[in-house]
């Protein structure tokens, strides 16, 4: 339902994407291959210091069913089976990991013109239950989420938020960490034609009276080149340049400088995504 409210997990997502998406300070390589018949293969590798971590995943689509299987460096196998429209406006997903027999989980999403509900339950004798809901419209939505641990009979999360979306700006306010933090975020499209946008996120902790913030911006230099920059409250400055050197194939360079680390060199990252 494109005109309905977004899921609660997407409140403030536009700001988060501008400030964090594609920033990478390691060496990352991704190869995506699509095949006729609904089968796709993705290989990802990340080098952190001298350690190499990678995984191979396959995605198969047939009608309303999607099967995603991923194998990581430690030979763990993660499987997710998603079924759309098993009932009208409803999506379901069953996921589990091998050899972890306690990793089974069932997710259900219900989409409506004025409401979105997401629920999750672990398939264990003492499951963790999670429920998130948002009501309103595509422009204005109000939502919340709770998590309950049946083993300890305690709440693991309790958050609430409000999201306002317009054509040239978006703002959100989230009360999180069981009421201990308040996060406000805002993004404004300064020049939609040239892709110029600025965003800010501020967090206040009621228990310690601490404030933290991050501000940033993005600019499309040409149809194939994007640059971004951000500044955090701790003085760290990060920059990113992304180039689509061929259709759907991206090369991204990232850098971060910490003025407080006098003897520490800047961090650099390189990411290459290929889609033949």
Image (cartoon, rainbow, N blue to C red):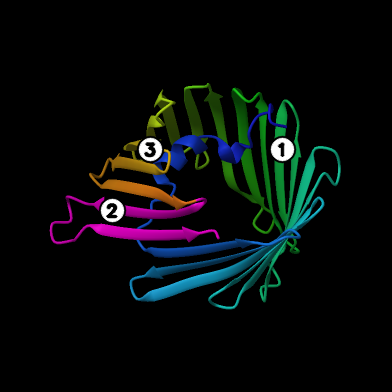
Vertical comparison of 85 with 202: above or below:
below
Tell me residue 171's x, y (percent): 47, 26
Viewer-proximal residue, 145 or 61? 61
Q: Earlier in the sequence, mark 2 or mark 3?
A: 3
Tell me residue 156's x, y (percent): 59, 49
Instruction: Identify which residue is drawn at 79% across, 42% down.
Output: 90
Q: Identify residue for label 2.
A: 255
Q: Identify residue for label 3.
A: 222
The residue at the far right in this view is 87
Q: Quadrant of residue 80?
A: bottom right
* Residue range highlighted in magenta: 247-276
Tell me the CA gap for discs 1 and 2.
39 Å
Q: Nearer the viewer, mark 3 or mark 1?
A: 3
Q: Quadrant of residue 114?
A: top right
Residue neighbourhood size for the residue with mark 1, other residues' Cα within 10 Å, grouped as few (<14), some (14–19), many (≥20): many
Q: Earlier in the sequence, mark 3 or mark 1?
A: 1
Q: Quadrant of residue 271?
A: bottom left
The residue at the far left in this view is 262
Tell me residue 118's x, y (percent): 70, 42
Classify residue 115 as left or right of residue 181: right
Tell me residue 222's x, y (percent): 38, 38
Residue neighbourhood size for the residue with mark 2, other residues' Cα within 10 Å, grouped as few (<14), some (14–19), many (≥20): some
Instruction: Identify which residue is drawn at 32% across, 53% down.
Output: 254
Tell me the CA gap for discs 3 and 1.
39 Å
Residue neighbourhood size for the residue with mark 3, other residues' Cα within 10 Å, grouped as few (<14), some (14–19), many (≥20): few
Instruction: Identify which residue is drawn at 71% across, 50% down.
Output: 120
Q: Secondary structure at mark 3?
A: strand
Q: Secondary structure at mark 2?
A: strand
Q: Identify residue for label 1.
A: 117
Classify residue 276 as left or right of residue 118: left
Tell me the CA gap for discs 2 and 3.
21 Å
């Amino acid at each position: 339902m494109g005109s309905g409210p977004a899921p609660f997990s997407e409140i403030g997502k536009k700001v988060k994407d501008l400030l964090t998406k594609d920033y990478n300070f390691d060496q990352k390589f991704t190869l995506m291959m699509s095949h006729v018949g609904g089968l796709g293969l993705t290989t990802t590798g990340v080098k952190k210091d001298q350690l190499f971590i990678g995984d191979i995943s396959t995605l198969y689509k047939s009608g309303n069913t999607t099967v995603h299987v991923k194998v990581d460096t430690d030979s763990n196998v993660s499987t997710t089976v998603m079924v759309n429209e098993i009932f009208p406006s409803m999506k379901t997903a069953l996921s589990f990991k091998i050899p972890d027999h306690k990793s089974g989980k069932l997710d259900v999403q219900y989409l409506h013109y004025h409401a979105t509900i997401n629920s999750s339950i672990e398939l264990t004798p003492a499951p963790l239950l999670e429920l998130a809901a948002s009501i309103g419209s595509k422009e204005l939505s109000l939502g919340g989420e709770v998590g309950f641990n049946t083993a300890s009979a305690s709440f693991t999360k309790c958050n609430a938020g409000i999201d306002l979306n317009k054509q040239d700006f978006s703002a959100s306010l989230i009360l999180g960490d069981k009421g201990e933090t308040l996060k406000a975020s805002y993004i404004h499209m300064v020049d939609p034609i040239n892709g110029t946008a600025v965003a800010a996120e501020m967090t206040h902790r009621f228990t310690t009276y601490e404030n933290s913030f991050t501000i940033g911006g993005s600019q499309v230099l040409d149809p194939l080149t994007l640059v971004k920059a951000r500044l955090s409250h701790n003085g760290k400055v990060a920059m990113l340049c992304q180039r689509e050197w061929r259709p759907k194939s991206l090369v991204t360079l990232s850098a971060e400088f910490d003025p407080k680390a006098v003897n520490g060199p800047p961090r650099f990252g390189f990411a290459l995504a290929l889609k033949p």
